Amino acid sequence: MGEPSIFLTEPENATTSTSGRECIYRSESGPSVLYRVSREGKFRVLKALKEKYRDDPFYRGLLRKEFEIGWELDHTGICKTLDFREVEELGPCIEMEWVDGCTLEELYARGPVDRDLERQLFTELCDILSYIHRKQVFHRDLKPENILVTHKGSHIKLIDFGLSDTDTHATHKESAGTVVYAAPEVLRGDPADARSDIYSLGRILFEVSDRYTGIALRCMEQRPEKRYASADEVREALLRHKSRKGLWWTLAALVLVASVLVGGWLFEHGGKFKRAEEPAAAPAPANPEEIDDIFEEVSRQILDAQER
């Protein structure tokens, strides 16, 4: 009783400089480079431009836009934006909090993720998207590499708003994102909105997990109006979902898709077969909208079956 509480190891001297920068990420094709620094006793991240982009007004403006968007966001699931300043040898930089974690991509690369943890991660991601969408912010580059999972507590931190857009910004409105995860309307050059982020969310869910096939398929509908209307709706679907063995449901989905397509074709053309010596004319090409309707119905049936 009465023993003093002390540091058990020799304390380190805190520094207020940004010397000793450690490069933690350099984009292969993009303009960005990230450094970890120690500032005022805390680790920080500096997002800077590669040397060849530092004096380019377009990329300086893009970096400034990212800061302005990040500065307005205050959510525990979003990496905090702290400052925008000129740093010697680096030029304009965004200063952000340091997140001790790994990307979602790295997490799944280690092996299967526990069912409860997976649901927690994706419901948290839905909460974050719901928050930014209420503020009329659209991420536009949602992908596993831009989603961090903290080492302590395994919580989501959404990062990299470098391609994000808002209704209030008038510049850098061009279509942007990563092709694999971008919604069809974005690839066509149409403006992105909340439903574009929902498509990307579904693409991620479909890629990393086999537990939520029906939910992912609805998120990935080709026509935006057929997707979930909001991230809150996706979250509710995840919470209602009663997980079965994902592989079984994936196979069931493929069988259902095949049966619907073949059955529909037979219904349409079955009465038109002729003898071999009287070849029938080739059937007309399928209507893309009819195919969309079929897949929507298939995904809805899968989702309903999973929830029962």
Image (cartoon, rainbow, N blue to C red):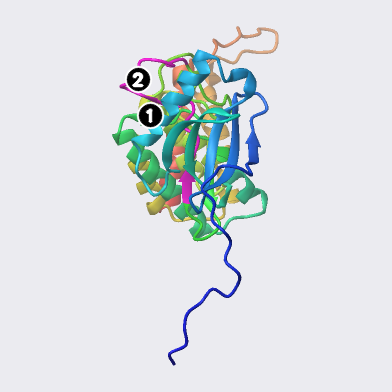
Q: CA distance from mark 2 to mark 1?
A: 10 Å
Seen at 46% across and 37% down, the residue is 299
Q: Quadrant of residue 231?
A: top left
Q: Does residue 198 sit above or below 252 in this rendering?
A: above
Front-most of residues 177 and 72: 72
Compared with 100, 88 (above or below) is above
Point out residue 185 in the picture as x, y percentages from the top left corner: 45, 19
- Is disc 2 in contact with disc 1, using a CB cutoff of under 8 Å? yes
At label 1, which amino acid type do we have? Glu
- Residue 198 in the image: x percent, y percent? 42, 34
Quarter of the N terminus within the rendering: bottom left
Q: Would you call the spot at circle 1 few (<14 residues within 10 Å), some (14-19), or many (20 or more)?
A: some
Q: Which residues are magenta?
A: 156-174
- Which of the two discs, 2 and 1, labels the residue nearer the N terminus? 1
The residue that disc 2 covers is 169
Q: Is residue 121 in sight in this rendering?
A: yes
